[in-house]
């Protein structure tokens, strides 16, 4: 009875904790949108945030994963670290921040819901994911991925700058959107979509890396530090120096923003990792739409940003596609492979036999 009670309490803590984590991500997206509107340099934000996150996660990697560290790092693992750092930190986070700056928190928080569908497409193309058109779950995953992509396109292009703005808002981003700068809006959506595509590739690469280096916190520390260095180099090459952005931003404000943002982000990563260990990645993924809903709610309340009916339809389509993919992956785990993934010849043979009998 005691163990059952503890299990029930743990279930409740996991559910409410994951809801809180996604709500925090939504608040963080709204916060980033306003910080970037003040003139904060996105590349510097990646440099400072990634470096601070690596320092915060370092104790966790030492305490929990020290015994999992390999005796030596092979060239293959080092190359994978470099790709994850440059793709997942420098490119993905940089493009994501540029997209947040040019769109709205609602759009930016909706795009990550594309990841499960894109990861399925990439994994299927690389033969990492089982897929057969003759399997009902394979067809469901393909349909769900298509729905996610269609929903993302609807959200991006039906939520125009005019529909997102309000004459009463005082935010800099909303004033720019009210001017009808549709080209900038489309560019921002393109940045977000590119970031999500890169993130999907990086997730597949991370899964490969963790097979030989089964220490997720340590991988995060190493790649965050390397990504911070790579981003600093990119900023120096493109801008001539590591620049904060607007000179009106005070040093104390910068330090507070970086430290608080990194602590919140790192805490969420630690908690989600614990939930993945306890319940698996599928349960964690189910709660991801909460981030979009919280960002949309806060944007409507604090920034007076309206959400168009077409964009709401796109969000519903994306969420439906997300859950179709997750449902198919869950059901697929219980389906005997010999029954689910039968080849074309076997299916046609059954049809011929039924016709001849």
Image (cartoon, grey):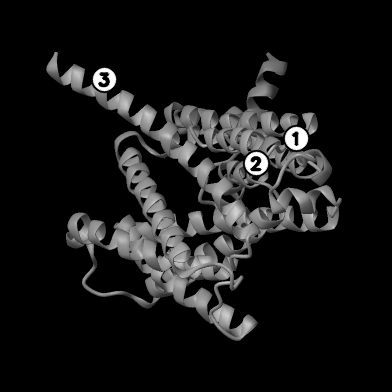
The answer to whether residue 213 shows anywhere in this view is no
**Residue density around tag 3, few if under 14, some if 14–19, many if 20 or more, within 10 Å:** few
Badge 3 is on which residue? 8
SS for dot 3: helix
- Select label 3 or label 2 by which is in front: 2
The residue nearer to you, when weighing 332 against 243, is 243
Image coordinates for residue 57, horizontal then vertical, percent: 31, 59
Circle 1 residues within 10 Å: few <14, some 14–19, many ≥20: many
- Residue 255 vs 264, above or below: the answer is below
Are the residues at dot 1 and dot 2 in contact (C-beta closer than 8 Å)? yes
Q: Can residue 15 be seen at all in this image of the molecule?
A: yes
Could you tell me which quadrant the N terminus lies in? top left
First in sequence, mark 3 or 2: give its number. Answer: 3
Extreme residue in the left direction? 2
Asked if residue 203 lies left or right of residue 42, the reply is left
Question: For the residue labelled by badge 1, is the local secondary structure a helix, a strand or a loop?
Answer: helix
Residue under label 1, please give it: 311
Mark 1 and mark 2: span between their CA atoms? 10 Å
Q: Is residue 34 above or below residue 62?
A: above
Query: In terms of sequence position, does the residue under pointer 1 or pointer 2 come before the other?
Result: 2
């Amino acid at each position: 009875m005691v163990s059952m009670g503890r299990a029930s309490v743990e279930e409740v803590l996991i559910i409410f904790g994951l809801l809180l984590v996604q709500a925090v991500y939504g608040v963080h997206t709204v916060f980033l949108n306003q910080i970037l509107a003040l003139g904060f340099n996105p590349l510097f934000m990646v440099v400072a945030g990634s470096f601070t996150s690596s320092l915060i996660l370092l104790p966790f990697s030492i305490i929990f994963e020290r015994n999992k560290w390999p005796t030596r790092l092979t060239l293959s693992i080092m190359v994978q670290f470099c790709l994850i750092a440059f793709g997942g930190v420098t490119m993905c986070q940089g493009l994501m921040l540029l997209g947040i700056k040019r769109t709205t928190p609602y759009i930016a928080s909706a795009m990550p819901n594309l990841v499960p569908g894109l990861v399925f497409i990439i994994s299927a193309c690389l033969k990492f994911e089982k897929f057969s058109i003759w399997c009902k779950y394979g067809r469901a995953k393909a349909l769900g991925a298509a729905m996610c992509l269609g929903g993302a396109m609807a959200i991006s292009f039906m939520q125009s700058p005019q529909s997102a703005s309000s004459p009463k808002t005082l935010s800099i981003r909303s004033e720019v959107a009210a001017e009808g700068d549709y080209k900038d809006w489309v560019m921002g959506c393109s940045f977000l979509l590119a970031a999500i595509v890169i993130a999907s590739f990086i997730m597949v690469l991370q899964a490969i890396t963790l097979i030989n280096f089964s220490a997720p916190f340590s991988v995060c520390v190493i790649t965050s530090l390397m990504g911070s260095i790579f981003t600093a180099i990119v900023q120096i090459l493109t801008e001539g120096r590591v620049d904060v952005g607007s000179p009106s931003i005070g040093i104390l404000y910068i330090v507070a923003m970086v430290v608080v943002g990194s602590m919140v982000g790192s805490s969420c990563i630690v908690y989600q990792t614990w939930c993945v260990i306890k319940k698996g990645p599928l349960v964690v993924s189910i709660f991801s739409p909460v981030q979009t809903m919280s960002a949309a709610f806060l944007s409507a309340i604090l920034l007076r940003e309206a959400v168009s009916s077409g964009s709401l339809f796109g969000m519903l389509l994306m969420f439906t596609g997300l859950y179709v993919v997750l449902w198919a992956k869950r059901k697929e785990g219980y389906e005997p492979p010999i029954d689910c993934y039968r080849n074309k010849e076997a299916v046609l043979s059954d049809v011929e036999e039924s016709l001849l009998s």
